[in-house]
Amino acid sequence: MNEAQLTGRLIQFANYLVGRWRGGLAQVNVLTSMFFGGITGAATADAAAVGSILIPEMIKDGYRREFATALTVASSLCGPLIPPSIPMLVYGISSGTSIGALFLAGATPGVVVGFALLALNRFLLRRRPVNPAAAPSSGWLERGRGFFASFRVAILALMMPVIIVGGVTGGIFTPTESSVAAVLYAIVVGMGMRTLKVRVLWRQIVIATVLSAAIMLIVANANLLGWVMAFERIPQAVAELFLSLTDQRWVFLLLVIALLLIVGLFLETSGAIIILTPVLMPAAEAYGFDPVHFGVVIVFGLVIGLATPPVGLCLFVGCSIGNVTLEQLSRAVLPFLAVIITVYVFFVFVPAASLWLPRLVMG
């Protein structure tokens, strides 16, 4: 989908929806990341694709380089939450939880994070003048035509998450088969729009092979570690430790939040999920937590680590594109992280906020 150059189409649609707001390009950045996250399910891909286009444009429009880069990094965190989410898939495989339910459970937190960032932009950029060039036509007929024209351009990209999530939750295909459907759809769309060339498919296969091999190495070693931990009864010991510390569910959640935010500082998200899920799940089950909700707790908490130093992958992607230092970017991203962590804490302590959609769709 990246090779088919669909990012520009999503930006065009987002610009029509929110470009006329105060701080229009900043709002377009967030909304595009939300759309793009529904295609890739990965924060680093989001930051690289959206950032390479919008960071230079925002700088040219007068935004501070650090702000434009920090916003891109923060908004990219919507990607691993909005379905189809790669970390949710990893958690589902590690815990045996329904992947369709996890996809649906992550949708609400991902959307709320996006709207929270839109609201924060509105506050931070409240003195920035509105761009009159981004205002739509005044007439209802012209507005309607403009909306449908931009939507028609973006609809092919926006159908990707509908196909994947709808197919998995509807029982049409398994999560593994959904990836095949997604690849075939991407090829058909790219070829149909004549933006995807046959000669680049081999390069994409090589890239996918290398990435898959790296993931399989992580999974293989994590399974070995899991066998050792199971043999030594480490998950049971951790569960007993948590149960001995407190019998209060909310205290357990506070301990888990602290653990995940600290681990996210140093470990890559998927690897951390594979390692921590079998350790924390017995304790979560002992406290009576829904495994789908606990998946949101684990994935959301570790995803935040992608934007925190010293090893936040999205920070390094942002530094490379925005040409800023890690220290500058780490300071600039703090207000956005504060809002994201606030949203995270809300969804941790209000399970119904993330579970209502999977319960509505899947019963």
Image: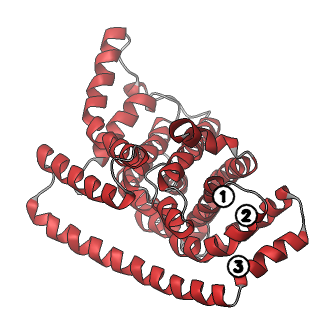
Residue 123: x %, y % from top left: 65, 36
Q: Name the residue that disc number 2 marks.
A: 284
Q: Is residue 173 left or right of residue 114?
A: left
Q: Earlier in the sequence, mark 1 or mark 2?
A: 2
Q: Could you tell me if residue 296 is visible in this image?
A: yes
Q: Name the residue that disc number 3 marks.
A: 235
Q: Is residue 297 left or right of residue 128?
A: right
Residue at 40% across, 46% down: 165
Q: Secondary structure at mark 2?
A: helix
Type of amino acid at the residue the image marks with label 2: Ala
Query: Could you tell me how far apart the alpha carbons at marks 1 and 3 are, in whole angstroms?
Result: 16 Å
Whether label 1 touches label 3, CB < 8 Å? no
Based on the displayed image, in which of its 4 quarters is residue 139 positioned? top left
| Front in this rendered view, residue 95 or 325 | 95
Q: Is residue 115 above or below residue 39?
A: above
Crowd tier of the residue under label 3, counting other residues whose Cα lies within 10 Å: few below 14, some 14–19, many 20 or above: many
Q: Secondary structure at mark 1?
A: helix
Residue 151: x %, y % from top left: 31, 30
Q: Earlier in the sequence, mark 1 or mark 3?
A: 3
| Front in this rendered view, residue 228 or 296 | 228
Q: Earlier in the sequence, mark 2 or mark 3?
A: 3
Whether label 2 touches label 3, CB < 8 Å? no
Type of amino acid at the residue the image marks with label 1: Phe
Type of amino acid at the residue the image marks with label 3: Pro
Q: Name the residue that disc number 1 marks.
A: 294
Q: Is residue 94 above or below residue 217?
A: above
Residue at 80% across, 66% down: 255
Residue at 38% across, 58% down: 175
Whether label 1 touches label 2, CB < 8 Å? yes
Q: Is residue 335 above or below residue 261?
A: above
Q: Is residue 179 left or right of residue 229?
A: left
